[in-house]
Image: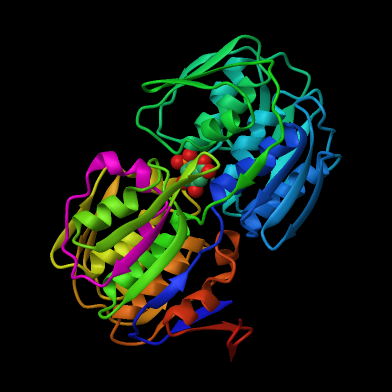
Amino acid sequence: MEFKLLPGGVISGEARVPGDKSISHRAVMLGALAEGETRINGFLEGEDALATVAAFRALGVRIEGPEDGGLRVHGVGLHGLKAAGATLDMGNSGTSIRLLTGILAGQPFDSRLSGDASLCRRPMGRVMRPLALMGARIEAAAGETPPLLVRGGQTLEGIHYDLPVASAQVKSCVLLAGLYAEGTTTVTEPAPTRDHTERMLQGFGYEVRRDNDVILLRGGGSLRGTAIDVPADISSAAFFLVAASIAPGSELLLTHVGMNPTRTGVINILTLMGADITVQDEREIGGEPVADLLVRYAPLRGIEIPEDQVPLAIDEFPALFIAAACAEGRTVLRGAGELRVKESDRIAAMAEGLATLGIANEVLEDGIIIEGGRLGGGVIRTHLDHRIAMAFAIAALRAESEIRVLDCDHVATSFPGFDALARGLGLQISTRAGGEDGERA
Ligand code: S3P
């Protein structure tokens, strides 16, 4: 499937984007490991989160739904999982494979995990190393990539682990293995990363302590099923925050957006660039802050992106690079080497697409320099990365001619219905499959 975008357009109206991907994954995982039932609302029915659901079903957990974002997980307790009997297919989802590896390292049975071509290129050594220190036995393909074989029946011991990279997936993997470990597990972060695992464990009645940059839990407890209301994903909202900011005349209300402070870097960065974003009706729902965001068009200026914002906006850089392309002057990003090991090398993939549209940029090892300018049209390659596809779709709002974005199927991993929602809000987008033009609602 590919996107075809006519140039120009104004973004207006009101929308609630789909549920948060990180929270949806964790709700299923902790619900499965809890005692009793967990009811989830606002669940993201995207391929990544559905891969987590399928994995836990294969591990013997009864899960009803999803139906209209509703899911019921009949928890089996920390020690109730069963061997899957077949390889667990994690699709495109780094969160599924890395967090699940932590859980499976503590089971009495062996498990195999794999995924698509993109996932099978992503580094797993970052979770294998701390898990090995805890006593786990994990085998991987060459270069420490999936498929993974997690050997069961090992006794895990708590460790003190200094994360070498700011990664919520690695932190969460170690903490989840820590549930099965003897003694105390602590993790120290080099910079704050999303803390949904810690918050949600507490919501399930499991004690997790945080002391500055150190997070601590003790193995051997239990989780109690609960109710979880998943907010709209700020990472999906980000495309429309940028869309409305760059298209003159735009005014858009995004409702029920997750505003966890470890995720709001995109708002901080856009505001520094001159964006007009008003945070309304801030509230807390199920342990996570939520708000409505009113965004209006405003001329943007290039900035040096503060490095402390990088982990807080790590998934939003494809959208932010489009904002930088539409800004006046130069935007500089450094300290973002992690972008090279996402669903694609997002620095290289964005640099290529920006150059296609005529935007001058210089690739750095750990970032990029983007000169704002006039966007032309052209044909964009996504490198099978959902966020690259959506970023170049919104770029059309300021382009001078048509943009075609090839290979957009992966958009369904995080944002099912992106094209229909975007069309309803004013983007001139149509989808094309099998060589024929078509409007797919
Ligand atoms: C995620 C953590 C981040 C993020 C990913 C989701 C999570 O990855 O990029 O989309 O749910 O924990 P890293 O932990 O690799 O930074």
User: Which one is in front, 149 or 206?
Assistant: 206
Q: Percent position (x, y) of residue 318?
A: 37, 60
Check the picture and name the quadrant holding the N terminus: bottom right
Q: In the rendered view, tell whether residue 379 sits above or below residue 213.
A: below
User: Which one is in front, 229 or 315?
Assistant: 229
Check the picture and name the quadrant holding the C terminus: bottom right
Task: Kindly identify the residue that appears in the image at 47 percent across and 49 percent down.
Answer: 342
Q: In the rendered view, tell whether residue 190 sits above or below residue 168.
A: above
Task: Kindly identify the residue that appears in the image at 39 percent across and 43 percent down.
Answer: 338
Q: How many marks?
A: 0
Is residue 66 a member of the stretch shown in magenta?
no
The answer to whether residue 96 is visible is no
Question: Residue lying farthest left?
Answer: 329
Q: Identify the colour scheme used.
A: rainbow
User: Seen in the image, is 393 located left or right of residue 105?
Assistant: left
Task: Kindly identify the residue that appears in the image at 85 percent across and 33 percent down.
Answer: 82
Q: Percent position (x, y) of residue 246?
A: 27, 72
Task: Kindly identify the residue that appears in the image at 69 percent across and 54 percent down.
Answer: 50
Dividing the picture into quarters, in which one does residue 48 lie? bottom right
User: Seen in the image, is 149 located left or right of residue 160?
Assistant: right
| Image: magenta residue range | 291-318
